[in-house]
Image (cartoon, rainbow, N blue to C red):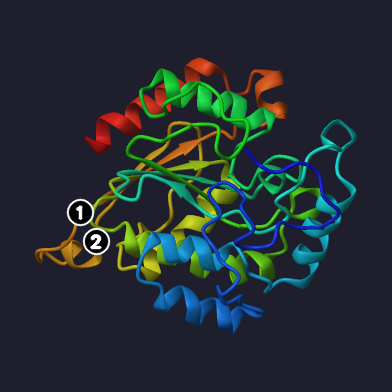
Amino acid sequence: MPPASNDRAAAPPGSGWPGDPATAATPAARNPAEVRALAAAAGSLAEVAALESVCRACDRLVRWREQVAATRRRSFAAQAYWGRPVPGWGDERASILILGLAPAAHGGNRTGRIFTGDRSGDVLFASLWRCGLAAQPESVAAGDGQRLSTVRMAAAVRCAPPANKPAPVERDACAPWLAAELRLLRESLRVVVCLGHYAWQALWPQLAAGGYAVPRPRPAFGHGTQALVPAASAAAGQESGPALTVLGCYHPSQQNTFTGKVTATMLDAVFSRAAELSS
């Protein structure tokens, strides 16, 4: 479990946080050009996770995530906060990638694991567990024993943004981390589930850059929307890598779950479909 409360605004890399992929020697990108260079050179998902977990390329996001980690929510005042970018995690040979918007200020920004420790995650992990894709029906903290089966999770933006709204320039600065994960998952990946319109929009440019034949016009987002995306050379009639299926899913935010816009049954249908397509 994470350490008890301390006076730091963020957990130093290599200080013993459960699952911390970085060490004190991991280089930190300080501008978008350095993000692009480090992400392109990464040779494994573990390396990508380490590099993105110490990224400092977006000044506004760095200030915000560390401010939240220093002040904390009253209900979590006794806990230390991660306060760093939240890297992708899960199966390193994943056939399903679940893509969200960004970490929650008092969820992933606190626990160091995307969707862990917030209300959206409570709903999400329960559905994944029912569909046989997660070891436990809940995920409350790094090191709690949760494991994902054939699934990896990531966010389009890796830092918690103010008002949960990243700026376009911040989204673009962060995009190479997602591009690197897609590149390193290419052999095993079969399905991407986009939680919400933001993730749906963020995915397509990275698929195009990664050699997939993105449909034109791009499919409109909707819950249960399904789009087949072949590798570019396959579209030209040549032998190529596997195609991807992109699935749309309403985000399991409190706003959506409390209003009934998305229900447990609706989530289960998407993840059951993802499991079927990925097998």
Q: Is residue 44 left or right of residue 102?
A: left
Residue 184 sits in quarter? bottom left
What is the three-letter code of the residue carrying label 1?
Answer: Pro
Q: Where's residue 75, x and y in %?
A: 85, 31
For the point 70% across and 40% down, the residue is 107
Q: Which mark is residue 139?
A: none
Q: Nearer the viewer, residue 83 or 244?
A: 83
Q: Which mark is residue 231?
A: 2
Q: Secondary structure at mark 2?
A: loop
| Residue at image mark 1 | 242
Q: Residues within 10 Å of mark 1 (few under 14, many from 20)?
A: some
What is the three-letter code of the residue carrying label 2?
Answer: Ala
Please determine whether, in this image, residue 181 is positioned above or below residue 119.
below
For the point 64% across and 18% down, the residue is 260
Gap in angstroms between the C-alphas marked 2 and 1: 7 Å
Please determine whether, in this image, residue 16 is positioned above or below residue 79.
below
Q: Is residue 215 visible?
A: yes
Q: Where's residue 90, x and y in %?
A: 42, 44
